[in-house]
Image (cartoon, coloured by chain):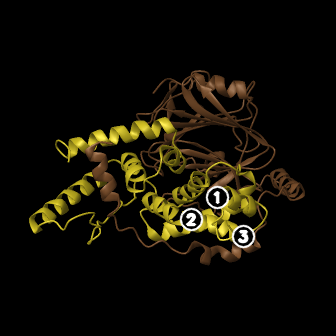
Amino acid sequence: MGDRPLAEDDLVAQAKLGDTRAYGALIQEHQTIAFRTAYLITSSAADAEDAVQEGAVKAHRALGRFRTGKPFRPWFLAIVANEARNRRRSAGRRERLALRAAEDPLSGGAVPSPEAAMLEAEQRAELLAAVEGLREEDRLAIACRYFLGLSEEETAAALAWRRGTVKSRTSRALDRLRERMEGGV
Amino acid sequence: MTELERALVRLGGEIAFPPTPDVLAAVGDRLEQAAPVRRRRPSRRALVVAFVALALGAGAAMAVPAARTAILEFFGLRGATVTRVDTLPPVETRPEAPVTAAAELELGSPVPVEDGVVRVRWPYLVVPGALGPPDEAYYSSLLPDGKVSLVYEPGPGVPRSRYTGVGILVTEFRGDLAPGYVDKLVAGGTAIERLRIGRHRAIWLEGGPHFVAFRTPDGGFGEDVGRLAGNTLLVELGRLLVRIEGELERDRAAEIARSLPEP
């Protein structure tokens, strides 16, 4: 039992008592998703890094107000995302988020034929371009929900939207993507 | 989950995000130095409030440094954020304060108000019926799609604000194009209340002075873009964010907001 990783509630409780190692374990658990969320918002790796660092420090200072028993991730994401928004350039100057498909995507099954692989690559590129062509709020909804796998609650926390707004914007974004993909993928 | 959604999830697994930095390596020292979690420091807050009061008494213009303190609560509207912090940022006095309220408040360029009509080519303008045409109006192109400010001079039932030097200041801009343009820092002594003005979301700030900072065009906070503010109502009116500031009671501010025409 001594080697069993502590549950999140236990880590939060210990962190609240001043155990920075417990807090560090919480941050390590969530730093990747927090960084990627910040990256989606800022379109800048450097700004996203700053946002996560500052968010981690501010979350630590505010930990006393965090209710034990609630999930830590949405709360942390909200703080980091707020930092990310603070660093984001104004809408008029903001560069488009440049997502790049990995050159060697994970393959879940048999090796496809060269023709099939090319077709899949084209479809991925087409879908990616369609997502990048969405208006910002639609793109963020899609990216948070599907690229990052955030729940509606987490997406709402990260983007400072109501949960119903997340639902409606995601639905609208999917409709627009279908239109852009001319009949779906 | 539809086929499109499945395709998006697959695509998400193939996105080459930048490598995640080691957050703890970067901030470990700051965590060790920081006070662990909730720690009320009323004496320090009292000092800050006293300092703020002294600065106000001197009539000095304020500037807010970008430095922030621990976040305790966060409220958001489209176009505005309200953050309760344990202490307000340090206050600096600016000895050479601009003479006019408009310049001091950085409202932009004056636009004429003729025959009770604000002559500005800004399609989103809403004038609160409860106040009528303003005494002065300003337009700023600082924001995407601009910002309009309506200034009402003090008069019966409208005292001069200690913070703006005018009676009532109404600011309007496209909240959907400028998320988080208005950033308010609130410490103890200021009550934050969520309201509904009809079907519109709103936040009411009342009590002690708070900081209001306006984002610069590059998205940051300049040294000279923050100031102290008094009672304020923030209303999310469709695409607009309307900010009403003055020595107002909550009900009066809500009445003014309700008299805004629907966009």
The chain to which mark 2 is attached is A
For mark 2, give the secondary structure. helix
Lower position in the chain sequence, tag 1 or tag 2: 1
Q: Quadrant of residue A58?
A: bottom right
Query: Height in image: B161 above or below A3?
Result: above
Q: Residue furthest right?
A: B43
Which residue: 24% across, 63% down? A109
The amino acid beneath tag 1 is: Glu
The chain to which mark 3 is attached is A
Give coordinates of residue A78: x percent, y percent. Answer: 57, 52
Which label sits on residue A8? 1
What color was chain B assigned in the picture? brown
Give coordinates of residue A172: x percent, y percent. Answer: 34, 38
Residue B235 at least partly seen: yes
| Front of the two marks 3 and 1 | 1
Which label sits on residue A20? 3
What color was chain A assigned in the picture? yellow
Q: Label 1 vs label 2: CA separation?
A: 10 Å
Label 2 crowd (10 A; few <14 / some 14-19 / many >=20): few
Between B158 and A99, the one lying in front of the other is A99
Q: Quadrant of the N terminus of chain A?
A: bottom right
Which residue: 48% across, 52% down? B142
